[in-house]
Image (spheres, helix red, strand yellow):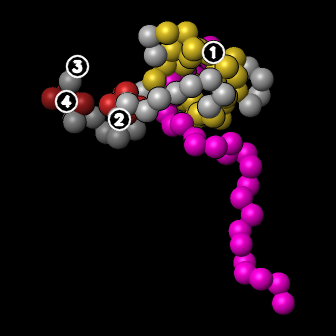
Amino acid sequence: MGKKFDKHLSKEKQHKKEEGITVLGKVTEELGSDRFRVKLENDHEVIAHLSGDIRRHKIRILGDDWVDVEISPYDLTRGRIKYRYKEDPRKKKQQFNGPKK
């Protein structure tokens, strides 16, 4: 309907946008036209496309890259790549606390 009618409704009655499910995954295959096959941590595979921010900043995604994928709660086979990690995010870096005494 538009803003003209929505602003008169109470906060509870306004429709809210469904939030996606963000999951860590690894790119397994490039499908062309900014689409990728991504294997998620829970062993599911989804077809994901690039988000607008990644396209705008011309971030390259290659095979074996770790990415954050946002999946729609309505269709769990498709997603959107939101972030690309530079290295495996599952590895925890050990902090250097100085020499042992």
**Residue underneath mark 4:** 3
Residue 17 magenta: no
The front one of 2 and 46 is 46
Tell me the distance, in whole angstroms, between the alpha carbons under discs 3 and 2: 34 Å
**Residue underneath mark 3:** 1
Is 78 on the left-hand or right-hand side of 18? right
> Label 2 sits on what residue type?
His
Is 38 on the left-hand or right-hand side of 101? left
Say which label, 3 or 1, has the lower sequence index: 3
**The label number, if any, that marks residue 57 in the structure image:** 2
Residue lying at 35% horizontally and 35% vertically, measured from the top left: 57
Tell me the distance, in whole angstroms, between the alpha carbons under discs 4 and 1: 42 Å
Mark in front: 3 vs 1 = 1
Tell me the distance, in whole angstroms, between the alpha carbons under discs 3 and 1: 41 Å
**Residue underneath mark 1:** 29
Q: Position of residue 13 (x, y in %)?
A: 37, 33
The front one of 88 and 2 is 88
Element carrying mark 3: loop
Q: Residue furthest bottom?
A: 101
Residue 65 in which image quadrant: top right
Residue 67 in which image quadrant: top right
* Label 3 close to label 1 by CB (< 8 Å): no
The front one of 4 and 87 is 87
Mark in front: 3 vs 2 = 2
Say which label, 4 or 1, has the lower sequence index: 4
